[in-house]
Amino acid sequence: MTRQPTIFLSHGAPPLADDALWTRELAQWSSGLPRPKSILMVSAHWEAQPISVSAHREERPLLYDFWGFPERYYTVTYPAPLAPELAGDVARMIGAGNVAADHDRGLDHGAYVPLKEMFPDADIPVLQLSLPTLAPQALFDIGRQLAPLRDSGTLIIGSGFTTHNLRWFNPRNPADAPAPTPSVEFDQWAAEAVAARDIDALLNFESVAPAARDAHPRTEHWAPLYVALGAADAGTGTPTSVIDGFWFGLAKRSWQFD
């Protein structure tokens, strides 16, 4: 079984599907990955304590957890196979008494929107894992517990956004309009900190990163990075910035950790 990397990606809103550049970047990225046996997705859009896994006994519909978009975004499907074996592995690694199962929870848009571009055949089992906290160290430790999944063919994906301040989002502007200075500053800091594998700085980003509070008024879209980092050999996996640039002012930088 080929060992899988871990990933942090900026997942975009449903209109990502209309962005020819971004969809092409995601498709090219996945084409260079070893084919996963299964995918464990940690999305910014599911916070639940205790740590929980999504439906894996019976299929549940996607969660269209967004409002005000054209009707076509509410008819998207992504019928990925269920992942009961992966759910069992997660429970064993974290501790069965520490993991809940939400059998009514389908994949939310932080999961299916990027997966539809990366693995459009929807033929790889997918399980979603909740964020039980936004504390960086705790999420990093969860990633370390889950790291052995990589050796059994599971691709661990943290799905968020490198900067996420929706006050900057203005659909009346072009998607590639110049980004606000705080978004640029945080993105550059993040690129340098990840490239240097400066785990201490990343764990303490709210204190040391420029424009941290502007880039993340709330940190749920940055938090999935820590699960991916922890699973990447406790943060020592070689990082590659696979996607960069901005989308309506938000940094869409995404990394792979081999």
Image: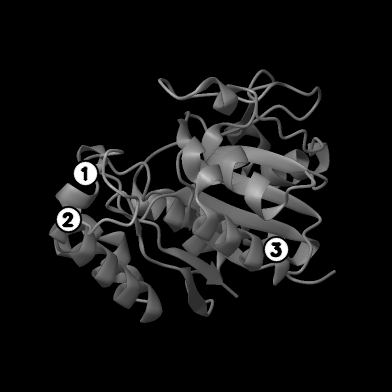
Instruction: Name which residue type carries label 3.
Output: Arg
**Mark 2 vs mark 1, CA separation in Å:** 7 Å
Q: Is residue 117 visible?
A: yes
x 73%, y 48%: residue: 120
Residue 193 location (% of width, % of height): 31, 74
Looking at the image, is mark 3 or mark 1 nearer the viewer? 1
Circle number at residue 5: none
- Say whether marks 3 and 1 touch (CB < 8 Å): no
Please name whichever residue, 167 or 37, is drawn nearer the observer in this view of the structure: 167
**Mark 3 vs mark 1, CA separation in Å:** 36 Å
Q: Where is mark 2, residue-wise?
A: 180
Instruction: Name which residue type carries label 1.
Output: Trp
Q: Secondary structure at mark 1?
A: helix
Q: Is residue 236 visible?
A: no
With respect to residue 48, does 91 lie above or below? below
Instruction: Name which residue type carries label 2.
Output: Pro
- Say whether marks 2 and 1 touch (CB < 8 Å): yes
Task: Give the quadrant of residue 195.
Answer: bottom left
Looking at the image, is mark 2 or mark 3 nearer the viewer? 2
x 72%, y 35%: residue: 78
x 68%, y 58%: residue: 155
Residue 54 location (% of width, % of height): 65, 30
**Number of other residues with Cα within 10 Å of mark 3, as a class: few under 14, some 14 to 19, many 20 or more:** many
Q: Where is mark 1, residue-wise?
A: 168
